[in-house]
Image (cartoon, rainbow, N blue to C red):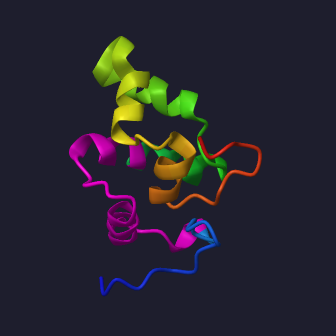
Amino acid sequence: MDGTLPARDAEGYLIEPGDWNEDVARVLARDENIELTDDHWDAIRFMREYYEEHQIAADARFVIKHLSERFGRDAQKKLFELFPYGYVKQACKIAGMKRPRAWSTG
């Protein structure tokens, strides 16, 4: 990828989630100072699958439930280790979601 991203809103979220791909995710992650690991990709891919099925961003609790298969009771803690500035601020953005309207950026 040449570093050119699809259209984004003023806060850096993709305007059209369908424009997302894994190269876009890498650039968005770099903008957030996150180096994507297998654990990041596990969460991001789950979020993308959820979006494809439901046409909305997964609530954090669904991602935590997914992560609990690997991390057990530490899943919530793990999610916030992976995305330290918050689920909406970083995970949703990197996964190519529109900024959820009803959620805070925390």
Q: Is residue 43 left or right of residue 12?
A: left
Q: Residue at x 41, y 68 (%)?
A: 21
Indicate yes or no whether the magenta region holds residue 76.
Answer: no
Residue 97 x/y as whole percent: 57, 58
Rendering quarter of residue 32: bottom left
In this rendering, the answer to whether 43 lies above or below 61 is below
Rendered-image quadrant of the N terminus = bottom left
Magenta region, main secondary structure: helix
In this rendering, the answer to whether 51 lies above or below 68 is below
Q: Is residue 63 left or right of residue 56?
A: left
Indicate yes or no whether the magenta region holds residue 29.
Answer: yes
Q: Which residues are magenta?
A: 17-44
Q: Residue at x 33, y 42 (%)?
A: 42
How many numbered discs? 0
Residue 57 x/y as whole percent: 61, 48
Please, which residue is most extreme toward the right here?
Answer: 102
Rendering quarter of residue 40: top left
Rendered-image quadrant of the C terminus = top right
Residue 99 x/y as whole percent: 65, 57
Residue 73 x/y as whole percent: 38, 12
Rendering quarter of residue 74: top left
Q: Nearer the viewer, residue 73 or 52?
A: 73
Q: Residue at x 58, y 75 (%)?
A: 8
